[in-house]
């Protein structure tokens, strides 16, 4: 499938919405946006499988994702850890103890039933996504049709039903109500991922219909209507359905998404990752070191937070990319000498 830059733009919006939700609240529910991101991830998981790029090997698929993500993840963790614990540097035992307690987070196993919490708390979404994606990709390699047509629907139904019955809501933020069952977030991710996987084929068919049968004007009007309905939707499940249909317009290259299908947004994948990884690094200092912001309304604070978050993310990418390039150069020199 051709690179679709409107999807990259969508990822930036999602990352900012999640960050704003953790800050002072987002216009849209950040809980819902997290689920939509998982649905999007499920769709592209199936895409990756059928691309043949990983030769049906789940380990290759997961290793490739970790190779792209983990260096940035580790750097973001170290920045946050050192900034939080810098006062403890004068107390080496305490500092080392804190770091030892953070080892599960370094290994990306928080909130999967092994370890609860973490310093960079929003990143439970990343660890659970990596684990769930690996398992589902492995199932696809065994039998893709049974996985897509049986396992995914049943998992999605069970997951959504469990959360609705357990908490009277489907939102992931209430997973702690399970008590000591720390895999609640992992169950939530499985449900949304499976939903994204099972709609893969219908989405491709719908996007092809939009591309070949709808005029540009009709596609624009219909996609605009979907945005309005999504904005007004009070039911999260209706919002899921509206988003899935809107995703078909993104894939078709028609309608409002076509306005953002440009190379300018090619940075979207890395920028959204940088926003997501570093939201806590911007939120915590803002809360604790900038009390003067309290005189402004939550809306004004959020409007100030967005450019600050974008600036931090861009600086993080600049530093990270130069640091990784320098490390690779040093490793190349070492290998040549050896």
Image: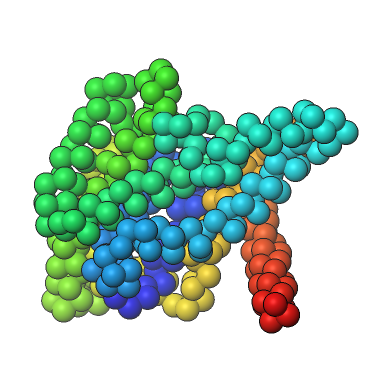
Q: Is residue 117 visible?
A: yes
Q: State the residue in front, 338 or 304.
A: 338
- Describe residue 96's horizontal placement relative to residue 56 as left or right: right
Image quadrant where one finds the C terminus? bottom right
Left or right placement of residue 134 versus residue 244 in this view = right
Which quadrant would residue 283 be assigned to in this image? top right
Q: Is residue 272 above or below residue 195?
A: below
Q: Nearer the viewer, residue 67 or 129?
A: 67
Work out whether residue 226 can be spotted.
no
Which x, y percent locates residue 66?
48, 58
Residue 16: give x, y in percent of width and height.
Answer: 52, 52
Name the foreground residue: 223 vs 332.
Answer: 332
Which image quadrant for residue 255?
bottom left
* Residue 307 in the image, given as x and y percentages of width and height: 64, 56
Horizontal and vertical percent for residue 170? Answer: 31, 31
Q: For the view shown, which residue lies furthest in the right direction?
A: 90
Instruction: Name the residue at 71% across, 30% down.
Output: 97
Which residue is found at the position 84% from the left and 36% from the top? Answer: 89
Q: Is residue 107 left or right of residue 259?
A: right
Residue drawn 37% across and 30% down?
184
Screen quadrant of the N terminus: bottom left
Q: How is the image coloured?
A: rainbow
Would you place residue 163 above or below residue 314 in this image?
Answer: above
| 208 relative to 277 in the view: left or right | left
Image quadrant in which you'd find residue 206: bottom left
């Amino acid at each position: 499938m051709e690179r679709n830059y409107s999807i990259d733009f969508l990822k930036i919006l999602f990352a900012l919405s999640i960050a704003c939700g953790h800050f002072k609240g987002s216009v849209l529910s950040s809980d819902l946006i997290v689920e939509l991101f998982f649905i999007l991830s499920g769709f592209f998981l199936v895409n990756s499988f059928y691309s043949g790029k990983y030769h049906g090997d789940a380990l290759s698929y997961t290793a490739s994702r970790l190779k792209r993500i983990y260096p940035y993840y580790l750097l973001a963790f170290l920045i946050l850890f050192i900034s939080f614990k810098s006062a403890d540097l004068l107390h080496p035992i305490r500092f080392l103890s804190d770091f030892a307690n953070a080892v599960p987070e370094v290994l990306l196993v928080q909130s999967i039933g092994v370890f609860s919490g973490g310093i960079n708390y929003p990143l439970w979404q990343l660890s659970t996504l990596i684990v769930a994606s690996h398992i589902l990709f492995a199932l696809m390699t065994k039998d893709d049709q049974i996985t897509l047509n049986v396992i995914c629907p049943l998992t999605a139904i069970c997951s959504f039903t469990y959360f609705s019955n357990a908490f009277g809501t489907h939102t992931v933020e209430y997973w702690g109500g399970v008590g000591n069952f720390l895999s609640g977030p992992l169950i939530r991710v499985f449900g949304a991922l499976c939903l994204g996987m099972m709609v893969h084929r219908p989405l491709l068919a719908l996007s092809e219909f939009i591309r070949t049968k709808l005029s540009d004007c009709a596609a624009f009007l219909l996609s605009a209507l979907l945005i309005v309905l999504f904005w007004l939707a009070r039911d999260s499940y209706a919002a899921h359905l509206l988003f899935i249909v809107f995703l078909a317009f993104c894939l078709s290259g028609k309608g409002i998404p076509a306005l953002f299908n440009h190379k300018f947004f090619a940075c979207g994948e890395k920028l959204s990752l940088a926003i997501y990884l570093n939201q806590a690094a911007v939120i915590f200092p803002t809360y604790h070191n900038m009390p003067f912001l309290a005189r402004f309304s939550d809306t004004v604070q959020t409007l100030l937070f967005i450019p600050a978050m974008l600036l931090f993310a861009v600086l993080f990418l600049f530093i990270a990319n130069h640091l990784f390039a320098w490390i690779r150069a040093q490793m190349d020199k070492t290998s040549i000498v050896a």
